[in-house]
Image (tube, rainbow, N blue to C red):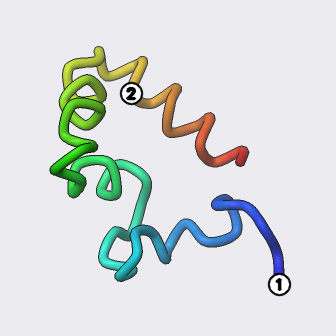
Amino acid sequence: MEWGVRFHQHLLMHDGRAHNFEQAIVYHGGEAARSRNKFLSLPADDRQALIEFLRTL
């Protein structure tokens, strides 16, 4: 088995309902709502840069 989210980008969140990193971020609420809202308030280029970074993990 390979470790790292880059190998499992199609199985995100505990129930696998997110099919990409952006969905996983947007679907979060509760304690993660503040982080989700900060992500959504970023300029598009910064959001894309964050997604690209996550793909390296």
- State the image quarter where residue 7 is shown: bottom right
Q: Is residue 18 left or right of residue 34?
A: right
Find numbered disc 1 in the image and state the secondary structure of the residue it sits on: loop
Write the residue at 32% across / 48% down.
25
* Residue 1, disc: 1
Q: Nearer the viewer, residue 47 or 37?
A: 37
Mark earlier in primary sequence (2, 1): 1
* Crowd band around label 1 with a 10 angstrom C-alpha radius: few (<14), some (14–19), many (20+): few
Residue at image mark 2: 47
On screen, residue 52 versus residue 33, left or right, reads right
- Say what amino acid the circle numbered 2 marks: Arg
| Residue at 35 percent of width and 48 percent of height | 22
Instruction: Tell me the amino acid under the disc marked 1.
Output: Met
| Residue nearest the observer in this picture, 47 or 57 | 57
Q: Percent x, y for residue 56? A: 72, 44
Distance of label 2 from label 1 (alpha carbons)? 29 Å
Image height check: is 1 above or below 7? below
